[in-house]
């Protein structure tokens, strides 16, 4: 099962929730492996940090990174000796990454999406493609948690290709839990992190600003992508009742409340996971995992029924 932890804005505590959920679920799996009867069989937990512009889950989990992979986009390289400057490549480029002049072809890598249309449509076969590195994907282990993170190269504009490369490392084992820590906001990188997920866990602050951004996140995750949603309220006790009233009106589940507490802020600012700094939260996050597991399983079952109904 893939659970994406997202939020409409930055700084809500999204990574705090994602890392503690991973550790709590892993503790259940370890308990089951030790025959203590607390877990769900051989549960394997994986956390992927999809906030590739500013990954920070490693600050909490301190993983040992074993692999390092360069990722990027295939960009066109024009062979001027074969090019007739017919302009076909520029015509088929939806992103205007190519401009054909009478004696030269200009290429703008910053807007190229690596779709390959230019090379495919060149009548003279004067275009080949070369990899332009735009980021890194690293994988390893943080105790019992399999860990992965993507890092976008400074100055690059498109995070989605790096996120896609990171998602290729997601476990496909039916007994695994993959927690994908999404970037903040509701733009294309967030949509890519939500795509293929089985459940969206949205972290919000109980303030007017937090409510505004929660509505945007709900619109993307539930209304556009059709995902089941649960809400975690962080810094509970500040602000107003707007978030709670909105969730009640929309039928959204409140799954966990984390209070506004200076001690929590101090611990997380030092890179200590919430369930480690305050062990009393471990059981709450284990309960959170169990609820998410049940709700996500219903979504997976419903999707399978839908596939069967259309005969696929």
Image (cartoon, helix red, strand yellow):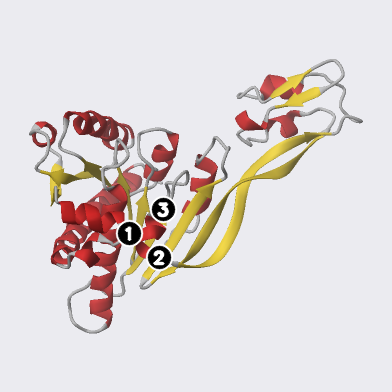
Closer to the eye: label 2 or 1: 1
Circle 1: element type? loop
Closer to the eye: label 3 or 2: 2
**Does 141 sit above or below residue 191?**
below
**Does 28 sit above or below residue 162?**
below
Is residue 155 left or right of 282 when viewed as pictured?
right
Q: Are marks 3 and 1 in contact (CB under 8 Å)?
A: no
- The residue lying toward the viewer, choosing from 265 and 75, is 265
- Measured Cα–Cα span from mark 3 to mark 2: 13 Å
**x and y, in percent, of residue 38 in the image:** 17, 75
Q: Is tag 3's residue or tag 1's residue first in the polypeptide sequence? A: 3
Q: Are marks 2 and 1 in contact (CB under 8 Å)?
A: yes
Badge 3: few (under 14), some or many (20 or more) residues near its Cα, within 10 Å?
Answer: many
Which residue is rendered at x = 27% and y = 36% of the image? 222
Q: Is tag 3's residue or tag 2's residue first in the polypeptide sequence? A: 3
Circle 3: element type? strand
| Disc 3 target residue | 49
Is residue 294 left or right of 63 when viewed as pictured?
left
Circle 2: element type? loop
Tell me the number on the disc at residue 166: none
Which residue is rendered at x = 74% and y = 34% of the image? 119
| Disc 2 target residue | 62
Badge 1: few (under 14), some or many (20 or more) residues near its Cα, within 10 Å?
Answer: some
Is residue 70 left or right of 1 when viewed as pictured?
right
Say how many tags the image has: 3
Badge 2: few (under 14), some or many (20 or more) residues near its Cα, within 10 Å?
Answer: some
- The residue lying toward the viewer, choosing from 135 and 180, is 135
Tell me the number on the disc at residue 271: 1
**x and y, in percent, of residue 179 in the image:** 34, 56
**x and y, in percent, of residue 86 in the image:** 82, 19
Is residue 16 left or right of 231 when viewed as pictured?
right
Residue 120 sits in quarter: top right
């Amino acid at each position: 099962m893939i659970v994406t932890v997202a939020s409409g804005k930055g700084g809500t505590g999204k990574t705090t929730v994602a890392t503690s959920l991973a550790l709590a679920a892993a503790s259940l799996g370890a308990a089951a492996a030790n025959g203590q009867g607390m877990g769900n069989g051989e549960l394997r937990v994986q956390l992927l940090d999809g906030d590739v512009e500013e990954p920070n889950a490693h600050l909490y989990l301190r993983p040992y990174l074993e692999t390092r992979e360069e990722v990027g986009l295939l960009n066109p390289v024009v062979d001027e000796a074969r090019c007739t400057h017919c302009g076909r490549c520029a015509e088929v480029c939806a992103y205007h990454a190519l401009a054909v002049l009478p004696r030269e072809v200009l290429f703008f890598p910053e807007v190229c999406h690596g779709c390959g249309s230019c090379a495919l449509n060149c009548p003279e076969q004067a275009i080949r493609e070369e990899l332009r590195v735009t980021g890194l994907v690293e994988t390893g282990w943080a105790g019992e948690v399999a860990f992965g993170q993507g890092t976008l190269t400074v100055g690059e504009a498109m995070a989605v290709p790096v996120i896609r490369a990171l998602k290729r490392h997601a476990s496909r084992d039916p007994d695994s839990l993959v927690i994908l820590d999404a970037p903040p906001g509701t733009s294309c990188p967030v949509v890519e992190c939500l795509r293929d997920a089985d459940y969206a866990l949205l972290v919000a602050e109980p303030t007017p600003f937090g409510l505004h951004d929660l509505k945007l996140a709900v619109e993307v995750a539930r209304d556009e992508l059709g995902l089941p949603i649960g809400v975690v309220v962080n810094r509970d006790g500040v602000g107003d009742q707007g978030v709670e009233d909105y969730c009640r009106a929309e039928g959204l589940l409140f799954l966990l409340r984390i209070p506004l507490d200076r001690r929590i802020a101090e611990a997380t600012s030092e890179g200590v996971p919430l369930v480690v700094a305050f062990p009393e939260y471990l059981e709450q996050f284990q309960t959170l995992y169990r609820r998410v597991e049940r709700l996500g399983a219903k979504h997976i079952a419903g999707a399978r029924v839908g596939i069967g109904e259309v005969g696929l």
